[in-house]
Amino acid sequence: MCLLNGDVNGTFNAETDLGIEYLKDESGTITEREVPIYEIILEMVHHYAKERFSNIIINDLDPYGL
C-alpha cells in the first residue's frame, strides 16, 4: 500500500481474506463474522498509511461486496 505522502509500505506475505473475522467466545467456540468494506478500508488506511481515524472520510460504499 502507498502512504498518503507517496512512500510505499506494507505487504501481505500470505493469502489473507480481509472479509472474514474469526471471533472466539468465553467457551472456546470460534465463529466467523463478515467484515463490511467500510471497516476494511478504514482499518487498512489507519494501519498501513498511518492516518488517524479522525482524518479518514469514506462515503457512498455498499456494506458488502463480492
Image (cartoon, rainbow, N blue to C red):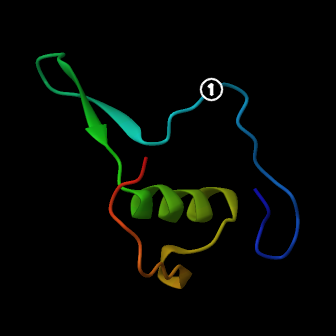
- Residue at position x 70%, y 36% from top? 12
As helix, strand or loop, the secondary structure at mark 1 comes to loop
Closer to us: 47 or 16:
16
Image height of 15 relative to 54, above or below: above
Look at the picture and state if 2 lies above or below 34: below
On the image, the x and y values in percent for residue 24 come to 24, 26
Q: Going 60% across and 57% down the picture, which residue do you hit? A: 47
Q: Toward which corner of the image does residue 15 lie, by quadrant?
A: top right
Considering only vertical position in the picture, is 12 above or below 24? Answer: below
Q: Residue most toward the left? A: 27
Q: Nearer the viewer, residue 62 or 4?
A: 62
Q: Is residue 37 left or right of residue 48?
A: left
Q: How many marks?
A: 1
Pick the quarter of the image with the N terminus.
bottom right
Instruction: Check disc 1: other Cα within 10 Å, few if <14, some if 14-19, many if 20+.
Output: few
What type is the residue that disc 1 sits on? Glu
- Taking 25 as reference, is 52 left or right? right
Residue at left 31%, top 42%?
34
The x, y position of residue 30, in whole percent, is 23, 21
In the displayed structure image, the side of residue 26 where residue 10 appears, left or right: right
Residue 32: image location, x then y, percent = 27, 30
x then y, percent, for residue 64: 35, 55
Q: Among all residues in the image, which is located at the extreme top?
A: 28
Q: Which residue appears at 51% of the width and 34% of the height? A: 17
Q: Residue furthest right?
A: 7
Residue bearing mark 1: 15
Determine the image quadrant of residue 44. bottom right
In the figure, residue 61 lies in which quadrant?
bottom left
Of 10 and 19, which appears nearest the observer?
19
Q: Please, is residue 55 above or below residue 30 in the view? A: below
